[in-house]
Amino acid sequence: MGERHASAGFGRGETLLFLTDDQLRRGIEAMFFAYRGFTADPDLILTDHGYGRAHHRAIHFISRTPGTTVNNLLSILGVTKQSLNRVLRTLVEDGLVEARVGTRDKRERHLFLTDGGEVLERALSEAQRNRMRTAFRNAGPEAVSGFRAVLEEMMDPEMRRHYVNGVDQNQ
Amino acid sequence: MGERHASAGFGRGETLLFLTDDQLRRGIEAMFFAYRGFTADPDLILTDHGYGRAHHRAIHFISRTPGTTVNNLLSILGVTKQSLNRVLRTLVEDGLVEARVGTRDKRERHLFLTDGGEVLERALSEAQRNRMRTAFRNAGPEAVSGFRAVLEEMMDPEMRRHYVNGVDQNQ
DNA sequence: AGTTTATGTCAGCCTTGTTGACTTTCCAAG
DNA sequence: CTTGGAAAGTCAACAAGGCTGACATAAACT
């Protein structure tokens, strides 16, 4: 680790040091600015519906894992049950999410999108996917795998578990 | 565009379609989970000091561009002046930031970190750089340039301008 | 002299996070 | 069968950090 790295294209040609503080600073700012773009398109749709990002996150992960429990969603989203509950309550009231009492364990609520919920989910994820698709296309396939590799390394281990694991159906 | 892309390693081997909805969904979740990791370490330090992410962002960009004006900071951060002002006021009151009246244009305030401000800035950016450095090292140099390429493509044009532009001194 | 610009400030609102306390339901182990 | 504890929901209170709108001031520009 330490020779022959000109790939990033920054810094003086000193070689040896692959990761200067300036390169790291650029990476940090890239995350900051890109995340703004990442959320910009769904945010527009959400405000039209009177929702916020918290609603989007709940909708996304319910859509990805239909029948997931509230507890599972809590561990994915990393918020308190009170915060999540407030969001879920409005989504259920508005008829976008259905919370079915579990059969095996009736304490659990299994969450599903209603037809209306899936309409909104598609609008949100299409907007977000369009930007992601354009970014991926413009950057090229090699860049995409690098993008994912770095992001995965940046996650906390528990989050990486959620990221790596595929969709597991519950009830 | 459309052949020979196995690099990402997802999807059925259908080729042709490089970007399946599932691959895009993984990219979206990667952003979500990674951003949490990205902010986790500074957040711990910030709460110790009674600050939040908004303070971190202000401190970061004042550190990157000492002497920047309030207006410039506003366009970088993309918030209202009321929001920024609330943050800047506490930082000035706490003696971490100094707001010098401009000499050329006395309406402007040029922002600088005090010695105390730089101490906090170093603690914050070191924590964040450590995670970024580890992620970059584990992912490798090729991945890093891909990471940056995709993120840059994801930014809104105005944000990309801020990202691309180096440090410009004011005052 | 009048207008625009840069900044600050007050008031009020919303979302979304937090903690703490309490209840209900219900599985499971003693 | 009873009881402990887990899962879920609820209420209250609070804080950070967004937002809008209105207004003030000083400086610069025309």
Image (cartoon, coloured by chain):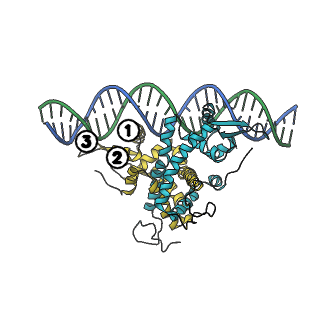
Chain colours: A yellow, B cyan, C blue, D green
Between residues D6 and A87, which one lies in front from this camera angle? D6
Rounded to the nearest angstrom, the CA distance separating label 3 from label 2 is 15 Å
Q: Quadrant of residue A166?
A: bottom left
Q: SS of the residue at dot 3?
A: loop
Question: Mark 2 sits on what residue?
Answer: A72
| Residue A116 seen in the current view | no
- Which is more N-terminal, label 3 or label 1? 1
Q: CB of mark 1 within 8 Å of CB of mark 3?
A: no
Q: Residues within 10 Å of mark 1 (few under 14, many from 20)?
A: some
Q: Identify the element where label 2 is drawn.
A: helix
Q: Residues within 10 Å of mark 2 (few under 14, many from 20)?
A: few
In the displayed structure image, the side of residue A110 where residue B47 appears, left or right: right
Chain to which mark 1 belongs: A
Element on which disc 1 rests: helix
Q: Is residue B21 visible?
A: yes
Seen at 78% across and 39% down, the residue is B103
Q: Residue B148: x and y, percent?
A: 55, 59
- Side of A112 where B27 appears, left or right: right
**x and y percentages locating residue A69 in the rendered image:** 33, 46
Q: Residues within 10 Å of mark 3 (few under 14, many from 20)?
A: few
* Residue B59 figure quarter: top right
Sequence-wise, the earlier of marks 2 and 1 is 2
- Identify the subunit bearing mark 3: A
Host chain of mark 2: A
Residue behind mark 3: A106
